Amino acid sequence: MRVARLLAPRVRVLALTSQAQRQAALRAAGVTPLLGNLDDPRSLRRLSALGQRVLHLAPPAPTGSRDVRSAHVLQALRLRQGPVALVYGSTTGVYGDCQGQSVSELRPLQPQTERAKRRVDAESHVRHFGRATGAQTRVLRIPGIYAPDREGGTPLARLQKNTPVLVSDEDVYTNHIHADDLARACVLALWRGRALGVYNVNDDAVMKMGDYMDAAAKLYALPLPPRMAHGPLAAVLSPMQMSFLAESRRMDNRRMKRELRLVLRYPSVLDGLAANVPSVVPSA
């Protein structure tokens, strides 16, 4: 919806959805809905005749190391004359654990989870599509997205539950992008950037996870979260939550600023949180 608000009514915006009940909300946002399912290639055949600039943000299927959904989309786009530009939203997880080092787009990919491997597979499909069709393809590698109107889009609920974080000497670096800045990056990438370009899309903050949660707790006037070592913490958090604490990276966003010419509205995750602090924080 954020991308649609930025584009409409200057250009005609179409959005693929598999949920018929979402069509009314899309139309209200100035978007023409298209019914289709990424798991059913036959439902995607109309895409090749409609999209001149395509933004592909759909997640892969939840299992396996291949992204058949992206393969289905790109196959459909090639049935006729394809788009002039295609932007794919990937993840910074494709770099794997970098042990807190600064990470540019030139770093070799070392995905360590199945979900990251699916994203690497999708990126390879996108590159092949660009080379084969001449379309201007760009890949955006995106870290944690936050915004107050997203489900789980702020650390407030975790802080209210007193969810623990890692002790300082075992902590990992975390990276973020506000949903509004991400939407602007997506729109810019549809028109700007190099062919086959790859961009880290993150803010300027350099923070470890525990420090981020401490700063957010102070912002929300809540107690600081307890600190625990990795072993005891694994008995408290889910495997999915722990997987995000197994990788540490400091993302370099200079190429994004130079080539997409994005000026961040929220240069730090704390800027974005402070702009939307609730007037009354509900008790836990």
Image (cartoon, grey):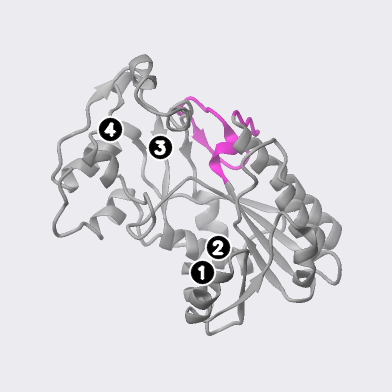
Whether the residues at callouts 4 and 2 have beta carbons within 8 Å, the answer is no
Looking at the rendered structure, the number of numbered marks drawn on it comes to 4
Distance from disc 4 to disc 3, alpha carbons, whole Å, reads: 17 Å
Of residue 268 and residue 212, the one placed in the foreground of this image is 212
> Which quadrant: the C terminus?
top left
Residue type, label 1: Val
Bin the neighbour count of mark 2 within 10 Å (Cα to Cα): few under 14, some 14-19, many 20 and up: many
The image quarter containing residue 18 is bottom right
Q: Earlier in the sequence, mark 3 or mark 2?
A: 3
Of residue 271 and residue 231, the one placed in the foreground of this image is 231
In the image, the segment drawn in magenta is 91-112
SS assignment at label 1: helix
On the image, the x and y values in percent for residue 71 come to: 77, 52
Q: Which residue is mark 4?
A: 163
Q: Is residue 207 left or right of residue 239?
A: left
Q: Nearer the viewer, mark 4 or mark 2?
A: 4
Q: Which residue is mark 3?
A: 174
The residue positioned 34% from the left and 21% from the top of the image is: 233
Of residue 30 and residue 81, the one placed in the foreground of this image is 30
Bin the neighbour count of mark 3 within 10 Å (Cα to Cα): few under 14, some 14-19, many 20 and up: many
On the image, the x and y values in percent for residue 52 come to: 72, 74
